[in-house]
């Protein structure tokens, strides 16, 4: 089958690093780690596994960071190469192992991509036993090669192909009435919901969401779907992102500008005061009670710390790796609580335990959460260069979620 493989050998890594400084196209060029080619379908690792045919495979911001080679080298210790990219998915069950009675071929599903202890066939670590498989301690152990999730493990494959394999515990049936587009969006939405459920923002608080891409839009939707009436300020790069943010529940939209001119609008929105230091960017006295950072750049991280109120909380959803130019002073000066989050877990919601993606699919089935419109562009696998260029060129394409349709010719 055709697939998009990521194989960062040292020569390819070094050549691409040098060339990409001159041309973005180097990250998908002939000498890059990215390869479109024929591969064998991965075998089922055990009787409790299934094979999923891909209907839609999403391009996530983390995939783009991977392709651009700007993720932390530390993550390579938790990854096995080469692997097929893609963890966001909507698919159809093609094959079930003999130990999977609850699923059937032809069933429409989405797969929770995390590969914790259960999928690896090892005794549950203390975190998995508590339902916190998002911080599994054994992601390099068991009968699978290292990998935090499908799309970063050489044994499972990924959604940038015609099919991949998943442990039955990862597979979630898609409710009738939930479109493939919404099913694919369940995974990024769960990423935004998870860090908010443990401590929902109070109605009288102010939430600043930095970033107008898919995760930023999901963060805004997450505040609303969990029932918070907090005031939401969206700091976005492009006007079309601001329009979407308003539709999903943002009260105020601020457009990013050169320098720190947009600080004035944020200060007005939160009732804060700006002070100018001897050199450098202005300092905000006051700020948002909660800031959700959804970009992961040095500038966005610096903004998140500067624009959060004393005693406030900062959640990093933007896959920050090795940022530069971040002034950490606000952390101690304002006594900020800075936490990170990248996937999901077992949540407590309205008196019951449920996985985050299960909750998201329920909300979608009930009609209280509609995210299918964020899927804006579709490409066959062989047009992967066009797809990546579209995902990376939002100013021109006005893209949110770009997806592959692997079975499209």
Image (cartoon, helix red, strand yellow):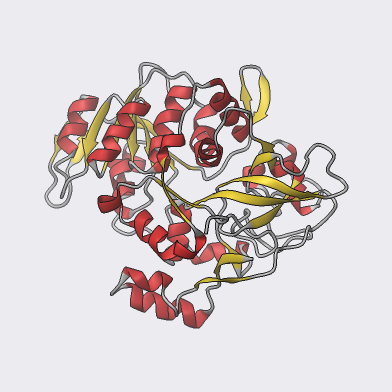
Q: Position of residue 170 (x, y in %)?
A: 70, 43
On the question of residue 71 being in view, the answer is no
Q: Nearer the viewer, residue 92 or 230?
A: 92
Q: Position of residue 187 (x, y in %)?
A: 55, 41
Left or right: 334 in relation to 149 = left
At a point 58% along the width and 39% down the height, the residue shown is: 344
Q: Nearer the viewer, residue 126 or 149?
A: 149
Left or right: 60 in relation to 170 = left
Q: Nearer the viewer, residue 364 or 116?
A: 364
Q: Position of residue 200 (x, y in %)?
A: 48, 24
Answer with the quarter of the image where residue 306 lies.
top left
**Extreme residue toward the front, this view:** 409
- In the picture shown, does residue 230 fall above or below 303? above
Left or right: 61 in relation to 36 = left
At a point 47% along the width and 18% down the height, the residue shown is: 227
**Extreme residue toward the right, this view:** 98
Count of all numbered marks drawn on residues in the image: 0
On the question of residue 401 being in view, the answer is yes
At a point 24% along the width and 43% down the height, the residue shown is: 238
**Extreme residue toward the bottom, this view:** 11
At a point 29% along the width and 39% down the height, the residue shown is: 241
- In the picture shown, does residue 179 fall above or below 164? above
Q: Position of residue 395 (x, y in %)?
A: 25, 51
- In the picture shown, does residue 237 fall above or below 379? above
């Amino acid at each position: 089958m055709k697939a998009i493989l990521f194989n960062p050998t040292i020569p390819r890594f070094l050549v691409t690093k040098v060339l990409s400084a001159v041309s973005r196209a180097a990250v998908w060029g002939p000498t890059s780690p990215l390869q479109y080619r024929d591969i064998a379908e991965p075998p089922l690792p055990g009787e409790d596994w299934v094979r999923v045919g891909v209907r839609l495979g999403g391009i996530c911001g983390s995939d783009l960071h991977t392709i651009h080679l700007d993720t932390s080298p530390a993550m390579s210790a938790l990854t096995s190469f080469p692997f097929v990219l893609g963890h966001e998915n909507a698919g159809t069950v093609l094959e079930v192992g003999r130990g999977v009675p609850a699923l059937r071929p032809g069933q429409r599903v989405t797969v929770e991509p995390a590969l914790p202890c259960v999928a690896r066939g090892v005794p549950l670590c203390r975190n998995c036993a508590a339902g916190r498989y998002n911080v599994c301690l054994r992601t390099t152990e068991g009968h699978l090669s290292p990998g935090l999730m499908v799309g970063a493990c050489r044994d499972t494959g990924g959604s940038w192909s015609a099919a991949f394999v998943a442990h039955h515990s990862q597979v979630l049936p898609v409710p009738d009435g939930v479109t493939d587009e919404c099913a694919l969006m369940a995974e990024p939405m769960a990423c935004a919901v998870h860090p908010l459920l443990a401590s929902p923002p109070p109605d009288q608080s102010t939430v600043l969401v930095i970033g107008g891409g898919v995760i930023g839009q999901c963060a805004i939707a997450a505040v609303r779907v969990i029932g918070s009436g907090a005031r939401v300020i969206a700091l976005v790069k492009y006007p079309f992102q601001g329009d979407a943010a308003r539709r999903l529940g943002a009260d105020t939209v601020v457009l990013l500008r050169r320098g720190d001119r947009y600080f004035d609008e944020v200060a007005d929105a939160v009732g804060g005061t700006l002070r100018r230091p001897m050199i450098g960017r202005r300092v905000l006295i006051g700020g948002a009670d909660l800031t959700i950072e959804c970009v992961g750049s040095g500038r966005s991280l610096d903004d998140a710390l500067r624009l959060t109120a004393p005693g406030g909380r900062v959640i990093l959803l933007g896959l920050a790796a090795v940022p530069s130019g971040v002034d950490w002073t606000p952390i101690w000066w304002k006594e900020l609580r800075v936490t990170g989050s990248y996937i999901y877990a077992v949540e407590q919601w309205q008196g019951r335990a449920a996985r985050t993606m299960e909750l998201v699919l329920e909300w979608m089935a009930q009609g209280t959460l509609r995210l299918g419109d964020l899927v804006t562009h579709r490409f066959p696998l062989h047009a992967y260069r066009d797809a990546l260029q579209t995902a990376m060129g939002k100013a021109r394409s006005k893209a949110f979620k770009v997806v592959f349709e692997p079975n499209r010719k």
